[in-house]
Amino acid sequence: MSHSDDIRNTLEQIHLIQTQLNDLNGSLRRSPLLMKAQEGNIQKQKANLAQINETYQKLHAEAKQKELEVAANDLALAKRKTQLQESKSNKEFQALQLQIKADEAARSVLDDEALEAIEKAEQYAVNIPTAEAELKKACELYETTKKKFAEDKPQIEAKIIHFQQLLESEEVKLPRDFQEIYNRLVRSVGGNEALAVVENQKYCGGCNHQIPINSLAQILQKKPITCSSCARLLYVPKDFVFDKG
Ligand SMILES: [Zn+2]
């Protein structure tokens, strides 16, 4: 194995480890973000349920009020019927009769209104179990994510430590001129963006920019070459065939 192969292998290893570290750090960041969004949904479902309950209570109170009005009307009607029996003059009798007729008409309207109000409240009540189920679902989703993250987190953290140690043991293998460029890139763009493989014999795997033949030749001569478009430090794949044409 030539020195060039050593550098190539090391860069490839570093790139692989950096990609894995990036994925692991990503999953550590994503779960809390997901939990925050799911918590937000719980609050939304709680507010929705409270709103539905409030509306139902209002409709229920309206129905009760109508029932009270019907009862009051019935009471007034009964009173007038007694008065009618006890009426002392024709004039009073006729006046009471008219009043009773009006009360009976009002009774019929009130009855309809009371029935309608009860029906409206009952129909609306079906929204409550639906909203309760939505809230329950949101809570369960959050708990599942929380539980899974609590289980996964120590494993992810252990993997990160493992890969970081592996990374350090690879990084020290790089020649000084490579290290300087690589370290600068890691600091400025992050480890995952520091390296790119040459794809299809001549394209930067990071940004798809075409690499000049000269640069490819220099890479094979163990020179640290960066992509002129995205600045990633380039390396060739194991099966790379240099095509001078
Ligand atoms: Zn590039």
Image: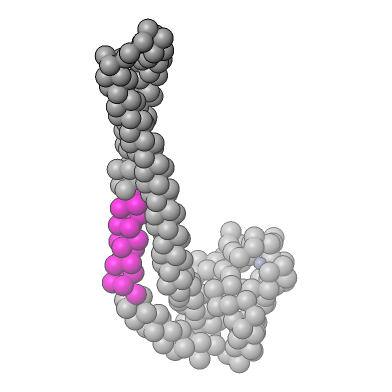
Q: Is residue 4 left or right of residue 89?
A: right
Residue 192 part of the magenta-drawn span: no
- What residue is drawn where x is 38% and y is 49%? 49
- What residue is drawn where x is 30% and y is 19%? 83
Q: Most prominent secondary structure in the magenta stretch?
A: helix
- What residue is drawn where x is 34% and y is 52%? 135
The image's colour scheme reads one colour
Nearer-the-camera pick, 20 or 221: 20
Q: How many numbered marks, from 0 up?
A: 0
The correct choice, above or below, for 116 with respect to 179 in the image is above
Q: Which span of residues is magenta-colored?
A: 134-153
Q: Is residue 20 visible?
A: no
Q: Quadrant of residue 175?
A: bottom right
Residue 144 part of the magenta-drawn span: yes
* Residue 137 x %, y %: 32, 51
Q: Quadrant of residue 73?
A: top left
Q: Is residue 113 visible?
A: yes
* Residue 1 x %, y %: 47, 82
The correct choice, above or below, for 7 with respect to 199 in the image is below
Nearer-the-camera pick, 214 or 181: 181
In the rendered image, the quadrant that contains the C terminus is: bottom right
Nearer-the-camera pick, 1 or 22: 22
Ligand 1 location (quadrant): bottom right
